[in-house]
Every structure is written in structure tokens, then in C-alpha cells.
Amino acid sequence: MGSSRALALFLLCALLPAPPISVSAALLFGGGKSAKAAGADMEWRPATATWYGEAEGDGSDGGACGYGTLVDVVPMKARVGSVSPVLFKDGEGCGACYKVKCLDRGICSRRAVTVIVTDECPGGLCAFGRTHFDLSGAAYSRMAVAGAGGRLRDRGQLNVVYRRTACKYGGKNIAFRVNEGSTNFWLSLLVEFEDGEGDIGSMQMKQANSVEWLDMRHVWGATWCLVRGPLVGPFSVRLTTLSARKTLTARDVIPRNWTPKATYTSRLNFQPSL
């Protein structure tokens, strides 16, 4: 199973077209600042919501973003959400955080629940350009007033409002998991625990003793890859957020003697704000 997934990732990475030099990448090479950053949309907007799994369950096991068992433990535990393609954005929306609240004052609390995009719901209520959240039972229940979680779940589908919110991972720094199957000629990375916007618009990597930043390709979910070699570590990684084009550089974060399936944690993170 693992080797099949690694082969699929490699083929996707190898067959994807080379990423163009985007505005954000050009800004990176020119100093990394943008005076016209769009920022995240902070307005409350209408959507619908359902729930899945156990009534008070934590939600999906893994999910399309590729976070795997991270969704089962704090800080993601019970905060995971599957979203429609409008918000999933072909995986570039992975890791983004939203506040969601329901509107029926007779049963809904005034507080919103915070969810992290970890999965995609491509069909049914999520199709045809709709904005939809399919939440864990625990997250869905938290939108209710005290003691009314069961009655709220019995509603099945709810009209809700949502807005972007800053991701806050409680003191954790950005980490990079080297995906299974990676070699000195093909490197695949999964990004974890990104504070602030949570999403990634572009990603570059620099080898040891080099001044060249190499554009990585977005494969799926929160996974990025590079086909080039032989690659020589340690590797520095530069991230640019999707919404506001904020940049961060983790220097020499992946050591020379890196190994597949290992996770390497940086010493920094974005500010936990939008």
C-alpha cells in the first residue's frame, strides 16, 4: 500500500508541468514583499453544514490533505473539516482555518467552532459550486447551546455562516514530513502546523552550498515535490501563503542525512494572525 502511494506521488510529480514563475515567486526572488497582498476574506458568508462519523467523534481518519494520523491528535483532534471544492482549491486550501456557526437561536450557541481543512467532499451537497462544510460530530455539536448537541445533530443539514480565521497551533513550529519513497532524485514534502493563514500558494527549496531556489510542484493536498538530482542536503525551504503572499524561510531545516517518513521541525512559524 505504502509503495503504491509513493509510486503514484512520484508519477504525479514527474508528469506535472513545471510551475510558472508567478508573481509571488518573482517577489520572492526580489525581496519577498508585496504591497498588493490580497489577504484573507474576513467577511461572514453563508454556507451549509453536515456532520459525519460518530456522534461525538473526532472526524476523518487521514483525509485528502494527507495529514494522516495528525488528525487524531491535538491540536487537530476534533477540529477537522471536509470542505467543498470551492474551499478545498485543489488542495491549496489544506490547512486553512475557518470559524463556522449556525443561526437558529433556539438551539445554536452564539459562539463559532473553529475547524481546520483536512479533507475534501467532492460530491452531493458539496458539488455544483456550493460552499459546504462536513464536520466531525464533535465540531458540529459544539455549535449548539449546552446540552443540545444531540438535537442539533438530529437536524442533519444546517444553514451556517463562516469566515476565515487565523490558525493557531499552540507554540508548534512549522514541520516538514518527508514522504515515503523520496530519494536523492525525487523529494516529496508534506507541510504541517502552519500558523496564520494555514494555506500554501507556492514553495521553493534550496540545496546545500547553492544560491538557487528551486520551485516545487504542488501534487495534491498539502504535498509538494521536486524532481531533480542528485539533491544534496541540508535543504532550506521557503513558503509563500496563498492568500496574502506572506513568506517564511526555514534554513537548513532538512538535514543532510534525511530519511523518508521522517518529520523535521523548523524553529519558526508565521504570526498567528491574518
Image (cartoon, rainbow, N blue to C red):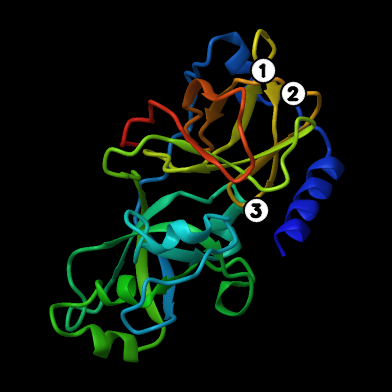
196 with respect to 32 (left or right): left
Disc assigned to residue 35:
none
Q: How far across and down, in percent of the image, does residue 75 sit?
A: 32, 53
Disc assigned to residue 207:
1
Tell me the CA gap for discs 1 and 3. 28 Å
Of 40 and 249, nearer the camera is 249
50 with respect to 147 (left or right): right
- Nearest to viewer (mark 1 / mark 3): 1
Tell me the CA gap for discs 2 and 3. 28 Å
Of 217 and 128, nearer the camera is 217
Q: Is the residue marked by circle 3 packed among few (<14), some (14-19), or many (20+) residues within 10 Å?
A: some
Q: Element under label 3? A: helix
Q: Is the residue marked by circle 1 packed among few (<14), some (14-19), or many (20+) residues within 10 Å?
A: some
- Nearest to viewer (mark 2 / mark 3): 2
> Given the image, on which type of amino acid does mark 2 rest?
Leu
Q: Is the residue marked by circle 2 packed among few (<14), some (14-19), or many (20+) residues within 10 Å?
A: some
Disc assigned to residue 231:
2
The C terminus lies in which quarter of the figure? top left
Task: Work out whether mark 2 precedes mark 3 in sequence or the reverse, and give the earlier one.
Answer: 3
> Given the image, on which type of amino acid does mark 3 rest?
Asp
Q: Is residue 61 above or below residue 179?
A: below
Tell me the CA gap for discs 2 and 1. 7 Å
Would you say the residues marked 2 and 1 are in contact, meaning their CB atoms lie under 8 Å apart? yes
222 with respect to 158 (left or right): right
Q: Element under label 1? A: loop
Residue at image location 54% in from the left, 29% down from the top: 239
